[in-house]
Image: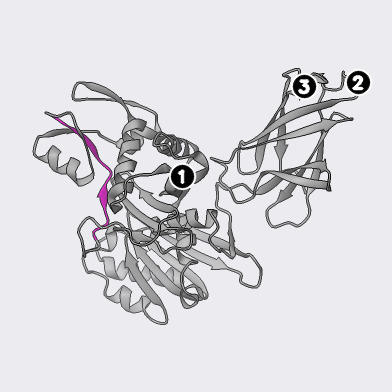
């Protein structure tokens, strides 16, 4: 149950194919908490499951859905997340339903497990993390959440690497001194992440090295200790996190003894949900002294030069470090005189920017040009985008043509 004054509520959801974990925080400076399905116990795993009851035709979610299906009282939606990602319809119990509508209601159920009804006007951010993100996953989750009345600018969809980054670097100084390691045994492979950061720079640049490691499972303890030695020996790792079902069962003996030599070790199942919750809080003003750019984040900042009463300035269309899957920014500018636009492309980690001048052919046929242009930047990869420009004119003085231009912008070829 939430206590205290709630100006805004932040959700962090680790959405998996089989299980989901939900964390939340009150206000950007709050401390994330994780929903437990049993009071007083760290029972965090919510089945990613939906079912419709046979008699009342009522939707059930999570463990309620599993129990009803096991009792023969409901019909389960198979592969809920995959069906929503692929934008499928689901035929079940004599009805036809859109998978993204069902996922939307499942996410509502997950968010309301903290005891507070979903109030879109109170939401600071809903941040969702998945194991490996894609454009299709981002789109399906974003659409499902907007169906609940949540504005798209209060939605973040990212991956486990970014969640690990925000969680580990939000801890106390002793826990983020030196490099930081995470081992994830959620699947058939053990994924290892090694996070490094350079605190001599501000903001501190962050890098994460990821590897997938096979575990044969015959002698798990000895095999995992060998893996830890291979990855951690001769490093300055002082903090280690273990996540995933694969570490259940109390078999960590030799490996635990090795890991604890000069390091702090933590094990749990809510790191990703807390981390992505912190990501959302940082997006709305929480202090953050680091710069992490993931594989699918934009590697450049795109600005357009404008003149106003205070002189020249630069309006950002896209920002380095934001998701290439969901970033889409629009601005309106007034153009007068020459039909040219000046774009500035600044690569991540560089101070200087490269200018790209674009002449809008077809706009120069009018004398004394003055027109309002709308510009929308749409990423096509982490290093490229299309800027869509539309001519709206300037009232009766200069009627708009409605003409459109699609300008390709790339940071890859700029040195």
| Towards the viewer: 310 or 106 | 310
Asked which quadrant contains residue 388, the reply is top right
- Residue 270 seen from this side: no
Q: Is residue 3 left or right of residue 197?
A: left
Find the residue positioned furthest to the left.
71
Indicate the secondary structure of the residue bearing disc 1: loop
Q: Give me the residue at 14% from left, 29% from top.
A: 56
Of pointers 3 and 1, the one earlier in the residue sequence:
1
Indicate the secondary structure of the residue bearing disc 3: loop
Q: CA distance from mark 3 to mark 2?
A: 15 Å
- Where residue 390 appears, as percent x and y from the top left, is 71, 25
| Towards the viewer: 17 or 68 | 68
Which image quadrant: the N terminus?
bottom left
Q: Which residues are magenta?
A: 43-54
- Residue bearing the label numbered 3: 395
Find the residue positioned furthest to the bottom.
262
| Towards the viewer: 213 or 250 | 250
- Residue bearing the label numbered 1: 133
- Where residue 256 appears, as percent x and y from the top left, is 31, 75
- Residue bearing the label numbered 2: 367
Of pointers 3 and 2, the one earlier in the residue sequence:
2
Q: Give me the residue at 27% from left, 71% from top.
A: 252
């Amino acid at each position: 149950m939430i206590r205290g004054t709630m100006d805004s509520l932040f959700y962090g959801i680790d959405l998996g194919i089989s299980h989901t974990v939900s964390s939340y925080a009150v206000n950007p400076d709050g401390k994330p908490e994780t929903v437990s399905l049993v009071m007083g116990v760290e029972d965090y795993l919510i089945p990613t499951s939906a079912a419709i009851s046979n008699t009342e035709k009522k939707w059930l979610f999570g463990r309620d859905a599993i129990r009803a299906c096991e009792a023969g009282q409901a019909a389960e939606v198979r592969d809920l997340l995959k069906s929503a990602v692929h934008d499928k319809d689901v035929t079940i119990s004599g009805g036809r339903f859109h998978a993204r509508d069902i996922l939307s209601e499942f996410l509502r159920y997950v968010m309301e497990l903290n005891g507070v009804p979903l109030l879109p006007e109170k939401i600071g951010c809903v941040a969702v993390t998945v194991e490996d993100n894609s454009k299709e996953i981002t789109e399906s989750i974003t659409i499902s959440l907007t169906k609940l009345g949540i504005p798209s600018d209060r939605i973040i969809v990212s991956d486990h690497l970014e969640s690990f980054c925000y969680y580990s670097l939000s801890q106390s100084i002793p826990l983020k001194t030196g490099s930081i390691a995470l081992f994830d045994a959620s699947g058939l492979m053990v994924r290892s992440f090694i996070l490094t950061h350079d605190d001599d720079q501000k903001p501190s640049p962050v890098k994460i090295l990821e590897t997938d490691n096979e575990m044969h499972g015959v002698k798990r303890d000895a095999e995992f200790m060998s893996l830890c030695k291979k990855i951690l020996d001769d490093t300055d790792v002082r903090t280690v996190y273990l996540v995933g079902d694969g570490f259940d069962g109390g078999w960590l003996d030799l490996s635990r003894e090795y890991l604890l030599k000069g390091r702090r070790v933590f094990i749990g199942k809510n790191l990703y949900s807390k981390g992505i919750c912190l990501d959302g809080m940082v997006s709305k003003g929480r202090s953050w002294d680091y710069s992490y750019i993931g594989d699918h984040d934009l590697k450049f900042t795109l600005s357009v030069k404008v003149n106003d009463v205070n002189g020249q300035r630069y309006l950002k269309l896209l920002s380095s470090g934001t998701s290439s899957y969901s970033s889409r920014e629009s601005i309106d500018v007034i153009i007068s005189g020459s039909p040219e636009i000046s774009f500035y492309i600044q690569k991540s980690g560089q101070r200087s920017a490269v200018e790209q001048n674009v002449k809008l052919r077809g706009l120069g046929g009018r004398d004394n040009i003055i027109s309002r242009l709308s510009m929308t930047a749409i990423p096509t990869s982490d290093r490229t985008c299309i800027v869509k420009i539309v001519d709206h004119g300037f009232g009766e003085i200069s009627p708009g043509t409605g003409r459109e231009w699609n300008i390709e912008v790339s940071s890859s070829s700029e040195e």
